Image (spheres, rainbow, N blue to C red):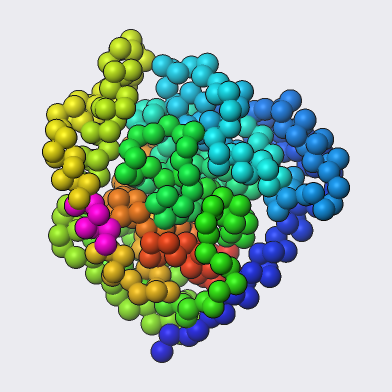
């Protein structure tokens, strides 16, 4: 029988989270953050710009606030992926086409965090159009390995201890994969939970705003600020049931990942969880890659085709032009059909889970690959982006010093359930299931 865990008890723990960020001394903390970031980023290349002047000015303003006016993220350093608008800072979408692009106003999500007391310290690197050519960012633990996909700058900055959280985006797997590779928490919420206004738009049907954080506590604290219409944290919490997703993709999961996850599952079983298997229906498994590609490339062509075609050839990668050409060959009727099939697929997957159920699966196929091999397979992450279901990666193991994550997936809108489950699993496992 599945144990009933009192998820609501974690609220008090999370409310005390800001004790790590004392009310006084924001200027000292931000100055120290900037010094560390400047030194470490000489080799990490997680940032494309550090905002020393703006961050210190904001820190001084926060130090001057009376206690009653301080927000829930008072003095918390943050970084923002370069596809998200930050007023006056370099947000070039990872492309030389847009070099020098500096938005006049903050994206609403960024402004919400600033209003809650967070301090933007810099802009993190993205792949080209959050989709194609890799950024210069390297893995924090091994400079010859990939830090992941387009949110790799954000994941590397958090993993290196430069900021406690950073904003990212996911259109296929660009939060979950880099966070798992870098050994931090990555959270892709339900589709639409966070606004994407002021973001580079690739696909209105796939784009998700999300975050990378040093801990589940950090992710919960930030989510409470970002979610415009979050569930009431005080409502009665359903019993937590964990299930294990059987592989729904053809790509092979490495022995390193499967062994680490099995140790994780063994620890959870010893705590009383049955971990019954969960199977994705064959139709969904067979069509999800095609649907994602149709939705993404069609909108890429419609939204950005003219700009990319007009750009000098040396400023656009061959990979991005291949994706563009694919989208240009898709008609409106095929796109409309894909949208309808996406809605059906989402409904089927959502019905696969009962309220309070959380599915567990690999976050990646293997540890971070060599830079020469690319950023790894999107197969473990892609389906949950297509379906719009909340997903989170939690570090649970290592192989040869490289992190391994487990992916948690919940029902649509049950984002707090996913976050609370992650907090419980983190508590059960400690730092890693391998220890």
Nearest the viewer among 368 and 63 is: 63
Tell me if residue 290 can be seen.
no
Residue 218 among those drawn in magenta: no
70 is higher (above) or lower (below) than 345:
above
> Residue at the spot x=18%, y=42% of the render?
336
Q: Residue at x 42, y 50 (%)?
A: 192
Q: Is residue 352 visible?
A: yes
Q: In terms of depth relative to the viewer, which is nearer, 401 or 348?
A: 348
Q: Quadrant of the N terminus?
A: bottom left
Q: Is residue 399 left or right of residue 71?
A: left
Residue pushed farthest top?
312
The magenta-colored residue range is 341-347
Residue 415 appears left or right of 388: right
Instruction: Point out the image quarter for the C terminus.
Output: bottom right
* Residue located at (39% from left, 27% from top): 128
Q: Between 245 and 254, which is closer to the camera in this rendering?
A: 245
Residue 4: where, in percent of width, then height?
50, 84
Query: In the displayed structure, would residue 406 be above or below residue 188?
Result: below
């Amino acid at each position: 029988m599945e144990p009933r865990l009192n998820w609501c008890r974690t609220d008090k723990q999370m409310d005390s989270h800001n004790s790590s960020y004392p009310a006084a001394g924001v200027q000292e903390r931000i100055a120290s953050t900037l010094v560390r970031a400047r030194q470490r980023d000489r080799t990490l290349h997680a940032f494309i710009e550090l905002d020393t002047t703006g961050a210190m000015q904001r820190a001084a303003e926060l130090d001057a606030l009376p206690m009653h006016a301080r927000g829930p993220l008072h003095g918390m350093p943050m970084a923002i992926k370069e596809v998200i608008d930050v007023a006056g800072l370099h947000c070039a979408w990872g492309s030389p086409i847009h070099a020098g692009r500096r938005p006049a106003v903050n994206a609403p999500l960024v402004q919400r965090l600033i209003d809650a007391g967070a301090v933007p310290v810099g802009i993190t690197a993205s792949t080209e159009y959050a989709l194609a050519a890799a950024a210069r960012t390297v893995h924090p633990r091994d400079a010859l390995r990939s830090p992941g996909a387009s949110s790799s700058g954000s994941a590397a900055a958090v993993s290196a201890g430069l900021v406690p959280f950073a904003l990212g985006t996911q259109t296929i797997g660009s939060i979950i994969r880099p966070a798992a590779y870098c050994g931090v928490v990555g959270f892709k919420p339900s589709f639409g939970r966070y606004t994407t206004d002021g973001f580079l738009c690739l696909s209105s049907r796939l784009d998700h705003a999300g975050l990378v954080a040093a801990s589940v506590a950090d992710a919960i604290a930030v989510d409470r600020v970002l979610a415009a219409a979050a569930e009431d944290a005080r409502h009665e919490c359903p019993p937590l049931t964990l299930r294990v997703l059987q592989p729904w993709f053809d790509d092979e999961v490495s022995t390193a990942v499967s062994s680490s996850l099995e140790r994780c599952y063994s620890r959870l079983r010893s705590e009383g969880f049955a971990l019954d298997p969960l199977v994705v229906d064959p139709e969904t498994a067979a069509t999800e890659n095609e649907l994602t590609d149709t939705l993404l490339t069609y909108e890429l062509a419609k939204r950005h085709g003219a700009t990319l075609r007009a750009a000098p050839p040396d400023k656009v990668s061959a990979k991005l032009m291949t994706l563009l050409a694919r989208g240009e060959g898709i008609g409106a009727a095929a796109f409309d059909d894909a949208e309808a099939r996406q809605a059906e697929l989402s409904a089927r997957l959502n019905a696969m889970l009962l309220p309070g159920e959380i599915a567990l699966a690999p976050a990646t196929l293997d540890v971070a690959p060599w830079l020469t091999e690319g950023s790894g397979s999107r197969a473990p992450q892609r389906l949950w982006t297509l379906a719009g279901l909340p997903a989170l990666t939690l570090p649970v193991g290592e192989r040869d010093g490289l992190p391994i994550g487990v992916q948690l997936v919940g029902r649509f809108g049950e984002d707090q359930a996913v976050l609370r489950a992650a907090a419980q699993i983190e508590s059960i496992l400690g730092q890693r299931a391998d220890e």
